[in-house]
Each structure stands twice: as C-alpha cells, then as structure tokens.
Image (cartoon, rainbow, N blue to C red):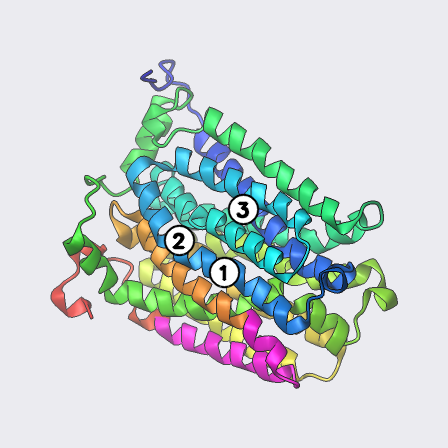
Amino acid sequence: MSMQADPSGTPTMIRRKVLAMTVALGALTYLDRVCLSHAGVTASIKEELGISDKQMGVVFSTFTLAYALFEIPTGAWGDRVGTRRVLTRIVAWWSAFTIATAAAFNLRSLLAVRFLFGAGEAGAFPNVARTLSRWFPTAERGAAQGFFFAGAHLGGGLSPILVSILLGFVPWRWIFVVFGSIGFVWAWAWYSWFRDEPSEHPSVSPEELEYIESGRSPSKPHRLDLAALTTIASNRSLLALCLMYFTQAYGFYFNITWLPTYLARDRGLTPERLGLLAGVLAGLPLIVSAVADVAGGLTSDRLVRARGRWIGRCGLGCASLVVAGLAMMAGATVPDALAAALLITLSGAAASFLLGACWSVCQDVAGPHAALVAACMNTSGQVGAFISPIIFPHFANPAIPLCIAGGLYLLGAASWLLVDPSRPIGDASPAEHL
C-alpha cells in the first residue's frame, strides 16, 4: 500500500528516530562481536573447548574473513532492494549465530559458527550508510555517522563489563543466548516501522521531507553494470579510502580482540588483581571512542560548513590518524601499565574521531551506490581486521605488533591526501582514476 507524508504539515523529526534505530543496531553489532574476546579471558572457553591463544586468533579472524567476503555483495544488494529488507535479514541472521555460539563444542564448531556469524553481519555498516544518505542532508551526515559509531563503540565498550557481571550469575554459554536474543527484537521493530525513503514514511511532514531532499544530491537511477563497477573500482579517492580504512581497522581491531588478554597477561591488569576495573580498562578504548565518534562527526560537519569538505573530512581524518599512531606506539613502549592502557585508549579514540568524516565521504562520492562504495571501503578494513588478530600472538614481545599498528595508522594518515570529497565518482576526470 502506498503511503503519503503527514498531510498536516506539522514539522517532524522522524529522521532522528531513524538515527536512533541505527545507533541501537551499531550497539548490537559490537556487543556481539566483543563478547567472545572478553569471555575468552574471564571464562573457561579456551580450556573447555581446547583452544590455544594462536587458535583463538584464528577464531577472531574467521569472523572478519566471512565479513569481508560478503560485504560488497550485501552492500550492492542494499542499493538494489533497499535497506529495510536487507538490514532485517542481516540482524536476524547474525543474532541466530550469536546464539549458536553457545552450542560450540570444539575448535571446528566454533570456527564454523563464527564464520556464519560474520557472513550474516556483513553489509550492516554500508547499509546503514545508505540509510543515512537517504534520510539526512549532506550537512548532517558527519554527525549522524558519528552518533551511529558511538552506539557501536559504546556497545563494544560495555560488553566486557556486562560479561563480567553476567558470569557471576550464568555460565558463559548463556551470555551468547542473552545477547543474541536482543537482535530479533530490533529486526522486528525495524521492518515494522522503517521505510527506505522519507517520502514513503507516513509520519514524515512535508517540511521535513523538503529539508531532507533539498540537502542531498539528486537521486540518479540505480545502474550497476561492468562499466559502473570499473569506474568505482578504479577511482583514486576510493582506493585511498580503502588503504586508509585498512590501517584504521587493523589497529582498532586489536581493541576488540586481544586488548583484554594484553592488559591481563602482558601488563598485569588482571581481573583477579583489579576486579571489575579490569573489565572497565579493557572496554575503555571503546567507551571513550563513543564520545570521540560524536565529537568527530560534529566537528567534521562544522569544519565542512566553515572551511569546505577537504578540511572538514580529509584534514580531520589525517590529523586523527597521526594522533592514533603516535599514541599507540607510546602505549606499546611506556613501562607503566596504567599509562599504557590510557595511551591505547587515546589511540582508539583518535582512530574513531575520523569515522563520521570517512563514512560521510563515501556518501559524498558514491552517487546512487552509497552502500556499495561504503562496502568497498569497509571490506578493505575487514582485511586489516582479519590480519591483526593473527599477527599479535606470534610475537613474544607484544610491543612489536602494537608498534606495527601505530605505523600503519601513520600510513593511513598519508592516504587522506589523495581523497577528493568534492567530486562524485561518476564525475571524476580520467586523471583521477588509477
């Protein structure tokens, strides 16, 4: 049935409710991702399933492998059929396999479940990016993306604390059942209430609809053929964004996989010694990152209005990764354990400060392929996230992999110099393709 906008003309803010739904989605993604890494430290998972540290690194990376493989197809699917249906499927799928983690009985079963979990969650962030590109004008997208990532990182930051609390009442397997069940509630609410376009939502007033549509790029017909794919894949800005996001995800993924182990085993900040504070320190980079996400998104939008898109998006992104790289290397080498934890927290926050900017750039340059372009960038990030957990346990000196991550952050900072956020991919000149 065709739905019309609110005929009363009363100003509405339905786009903010859409944003609130995506923020909740972001929180659920990281809540379920981070749960295993902290439960693996505080519970008996590795002993019960007979898994070593190196094998656990492979388990962490299995998720990102599947995520990377299915990210671009799922992003393209969202561009084609809309994010209402695609995000509903994504959340229902990953929630089912979060629950299925409770049934793992050895390494192989855990690898299979985590692979299917990653395949199901793939495409979530690019489809959120497309949702925001349709529901928010350009001037508000940095802040919208910042709030979304704040929800994701807050969910990840609270996960170690929640796991620590729940383990006092239930076995570790029930934690996955509890966390996974929440996603089915979100999927039902999203499919029932959300619509792909503001013009299709019955609660959007004419004033809000005009504001949204006047502040976004004209919608072009969705056409994805070999020529369009070649243009997208060879664009200099997108390739630079992919390299940048590889470095960002490589360093940041350490925080959601090995950080609890690093702080406990290599820095002596154990749950036995510090109690709940150990969980707080393990989740602190993600909790502080939630603040940085919002602040970075708001700062990016403000700089865009005052100084233009290159300063507001690329300049901010470059500076953020410089700080992230230097703080990570300092955290790896400083002798004091608490100072190390705080410097790694600063690094994670700086790496998150740019997220509103980089995901907004994807929307700025994507044309009708917002989810696909975002998926290309996020896929390269998942390659970095896949490699990072495998590398860490292979070094006897943990400072080495952390310094590698810091150096990659600096490389990512340089990549921003090649991005032109003012030119959509389809409008780029031949010189801007590689």
Examine the structure image and report whether residue 397 is included in the region drawn in magenta: yes
Q: Position of residue 57 (x, y in %)?
A: 60, 69
Query: Disc 3 vs disc 1: which is toward the camera?
Result: 1
Q: Nearer the viewer, residue 285 or 173?
A: 173
Whichever of labels 3 and 2 marks the residue nearer the N terminus, that label is: 3
Q: Nearer the viewer, residue 216 or 26?
A: 26
Identify residue for label 1. Answer: 64
Identify residue for label 3. Answer: 26
Helix, strand or loop at label 3? It is: helix
Taking the spot 19% from the left edge, 67% from the top edge, the residue there is 433
Examine the structure image and report whether residue 348 is included in the region drawn in magenta: no
Residue 165, numbered label: none
Pointers 3 and 2 in contact (C-beta within 8 Å): no
Q: Disc 1 marks which amino acid? A: Thr
Identify residue for label 2. Answer: 71
Taking the spot 49% from the left edge, 51% from the top edge, the residue there is 146
Helix, strand or loop at label 1? It is: helix
Q: CA distance from mark 2 to mark 1?
A: 10 Å
- Asked whether residue 266 appears in the rendered view, the answer is yes
Count of marks overlaid on the render: 3
Taking the spot 73% from the left edge, 84% from the top edge, the residue there is 335
- Asked whether residue 143 appears in the rendered view, the answer is no
Whichever of labels 2 and 1 marks the residue nearer the N terminus, that label is: 1
Mark 2 Cα-neighbour bin, 10 Å: few <14, some 14–19, many ≥20: many
Taking the spot 79% from the left edge, 75% from the top edge, the residue there is 268
Q: Which residues are magenta?
A: 389-415
| Residue 52 sits in quarter | bottom right
Specify whether 37 is left or right of 364. right
Depicted 192 relative to depicted 356: above or below: above
Q: Position of residue 342 (x, y in %)?
A: 68, 70
Q: Disc 3 marks which amino acid? A: Gly
Secondary structure of the magenta portion, mostly? helix
